Amino acid sequence: TSFAILMDASPSQGAGLSEQEQLDLSIFVYFCEAISIGCLTIVIVVYLLFSELRTQSKTVLMHLCASYDVALILFMVSGMAGLEGESCKAVGASLHFALLSTFLWMLVEGYTLYQTFANVFGYRRQDKSKALRWYMATAYGLPLIEVLVVYFTWPAAYERDDGVCFLAKNNNAMWLFV
């Protein structure tokens, strides 16, 4: 999967596999990611087209799908386009942001599920649009701050190594993602 490729700390990618097996594995990964991108895009389009379906929890789900969709697209671009230099750093930083944002939208989704099911009797009514603004500020703002700080204070963190534009493994920058 894309996470396994991004977080593989070993220096030898595909050790023990023949070139044909590596090619088959790459094709399989990109094929599965294309299916995921298509399904996530369908979810987003359905919620955009049918506004009566857009409750607060479905809006959170839509943002989660959009963040993950962007992350998968950036991963595919990073692996297939052969980017170098500043364009690779920009894609790597964008991928870092999209994945962190996806994780925070998962946190928000968990929190809204908790609010829905655990606080059935004792919950306080909150302004849904105000809550959504806080969710967006958290899920997009915190990753943005981290990525901007890393990008401008440690530019070598996003240098291409191991075939993918993401946090570099050779200088241990990948541990910023963990």
Image (cartoon, rainbow, N blue to C red):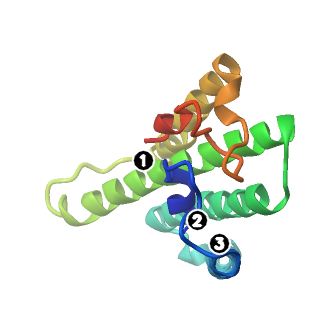
Task: Provide residue 72's location: percent of width, then percent of height.
Answer: 65, 63
Residue located farthest toward the top when viewing the structure as drawn: 153
Residue 133: x %, y % from top left: 53, 43
Who's the residue at 47% across and 45% down the image?
Answer: 135
Q: Secondary structure at mark 2?
A: loop
Give above or below for 50 relative to 144: below
As drawn, the label of residue 34 is none
Q: Look at label 2 and name its amino acid.
A: Gly
Bin the neighbour count of mark 1 within 10 Å (Cα to Cα): few under 14, some 14-19, many 20 and up: few
Vertical relation: 89 (above or below) 110: above
Pointer 2 residue: 14
Provide the secondary structure element on which disc 3 rests: helix
Q: Residues within 10 Å of mark 2 (few under 14, many from 20)?
A: few
Q: Which mark is residue 127?
A: 1
Tell whether label 3 touches label 2 (CB within 8 Å): no
Closer to us: 111 or 29: 29
Image spot of residue 105 (x, y percent): 47, 53
Sequence order check, earlier mark of 2 and 1? 2
The number of numbered discs placed on residues in the rendered structure image is 3
Q: Position of residue 75 (x, y in %)?
A: 68, 59
Q: Is residue 123 left or right of residue 53?
A: left
**Is 176 or 12 nearer to us in this picture?**
12
Q: Earlier in the sequence, mark 1 or mark 3?
A: 3
Q: Is residue 26 visible?
A: yes
Mark 2–mark 3 distance (CA, rounded to whole Å): 35 Å
- Nearest to the observer: residue 29 or residue 19: 19
User: Residue at 14% across / 61% down in the picture?
Assistant: 121
Q: Viewer-nearest of labels 1 and 3?
A: 3
The answer to whether residue 21 is left or right of residue 16 is: right
Q: Is residue 63 visible?
A: no
